[in-house]
């Protein structure tokens, strides 16, 4: 039995859906890394309506886990939001269920928060489970062709970054709640972590990339159960549109985006760009939710898009495609 009255410095939150194949490895590594900090902690798992043995595994093998088991699947954002709301402590370590962290992972990420009062979050580097190839490195945004475009780099030392990876990062719980958590209109997943990261910069906070304790990541393990590669590509493209419409605020950047929009749509029609075209119309169906979010965010913004873009050095970055 966990003493819920005891002080907690940080919580580890793991959203889970049908992760029985890798969940035990994730949680075992999480407890080992958390204990190495020598700080009081807790581990919260929110199961998002799994139909496999995930809940049984948690209850049998990990009695210290604070488990929230949902009856139905509601998507990544709502699952994370519930876990962060339920957790205690000033700091949250957020892990995908298919991530296995090193013993020094928690300490390496969390040490930055005592040094920088403006820090919102720290994101980790992840590599494939066989350790051969990077899975996630430093991801940033540049403005090009009327849109936010992703670029990447892999510096050896901690450095400012635009985006946190939701599958392996840490952040200030109070700031997360102040921003309203992850936006649910990206459901079932993708870009909601980038969206939150951009909001943090717009609010005057900053994010950091920490490459010195990389985690092993299977990558899209749960979401591959929902659809094939084409479905995932369309989902990613749709949510890219939603990210742009939800966050773009600078008038001259908005004018550039709107001026180029008809040509992008026409080009997709003429040249068979089915993924971009379908993703655009699917994003348009959620425009009401996006506009509601924009109105709420307007009162939180203190930093312009242009200033955010300039805040991170992307001179050595490569285009992500």
Image: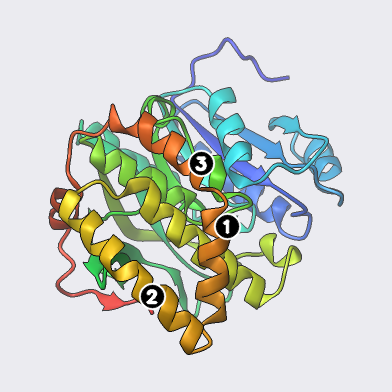
Q: Could you tell me residue 164's position as x and y percent?
A: 38, 51
The residue labelled by disc 3 is 288
Q: Name the quadrant of the N terminus.
A: top right
Q: In this view, does 230 lie above or below 41?
A: below
The residue labelled by disc 1 is 100
Q: Name the quadrant of the C terminus.
A: bottom left
Q: Which of marks 2 and 3 is nearer the N terminus?
A: 2
Dot 3 falls on a residue whose secondary structure is helix
Q: Which of marks 2 and 1 is nearer the N terminus?
A: 1
Q: Nearer the viewer, residue 188 or 258?
A: 258
Q: Residue at x 20, y 35 (%)?
A: 204
**Circle 2: is it few (<14), some (14-19), or many (20+) Cα within 10 Å?**
some
Q: Is residue 95 above or below residue 111?
A: below
Please say if the residues under marks 2 and 3 sit with CB atoms less than 8 Å apart.
Answer: no
**Circle 1: is it few (<14), some (14-19), or many (20+) Cα within 10 Å?**
many
Q: Residue at x 63, y 33 (%)?
A: 44
Dot 2 falls on a residue whose secondary structure is helix
């Amino acid at each position: 039995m966990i003493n819920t009255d005891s002080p907690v410095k940080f919580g580890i939150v793991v959203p889970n859906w049908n992760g029985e194949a890798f969940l035990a490895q994730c949680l075992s590594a999480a407890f080992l890394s958390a204990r190495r900090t020598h700080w009081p902690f807790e581990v919260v798992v929110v199961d998002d309506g799994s139909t496999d043995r995930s809940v049984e595994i948690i209850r049998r093998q990990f009695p210290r886990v604070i488990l929230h088991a949902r009856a139905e699947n509601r998507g990544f954002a709502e699952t994370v939001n519930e876990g962060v709301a339920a957790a205690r402590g000033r700091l949250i370590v957020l892990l995908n269920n298919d991530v296995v962290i090193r013993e020094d992972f928690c300490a390496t990420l969390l040490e930055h928060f005592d040094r920088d009062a403006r820090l919102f979050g720290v994101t980790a580097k992840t590599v494939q489970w066989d350790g051969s190839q990077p899975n996630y490195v430093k991801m940033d945004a540049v403005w090009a062709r009327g849109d936010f475009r992703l670029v990447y780099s892999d510096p050896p030392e901690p450095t400012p970054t635009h985006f946190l990876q939701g599958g392996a990062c840490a952040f200030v719980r109070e700031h997360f709640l102040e921003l309203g958590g992850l936006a649910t209109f990206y459901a079932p997943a993708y870009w909601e972590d980038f969206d939150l990261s951009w909001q943090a910069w717009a609010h005057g906070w900053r994010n950091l990339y920490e490459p010195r304790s990389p985690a092993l990541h299977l990558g899209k393990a749960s979401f591959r159960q929902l659809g094939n590669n084409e479905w995932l590509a369309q989902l990613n493209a749709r949510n890219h549109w939603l990210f742009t419409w939800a966050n773009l605020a600078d008038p001259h950047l908005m004018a550039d985006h709107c001026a180029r929009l008809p040509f992008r749509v026409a080009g997709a029609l003429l040249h068979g760009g089915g993924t971009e075209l379908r993703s655009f119309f699917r994003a348009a169906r959620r425009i009401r939710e996006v506009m509601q979010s924009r109105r709420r965010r307007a009162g939180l913004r203190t930093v312009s898009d242009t200033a955010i873009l300039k805040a991170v050095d992307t001179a050595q970055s490569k285009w992500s495609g």
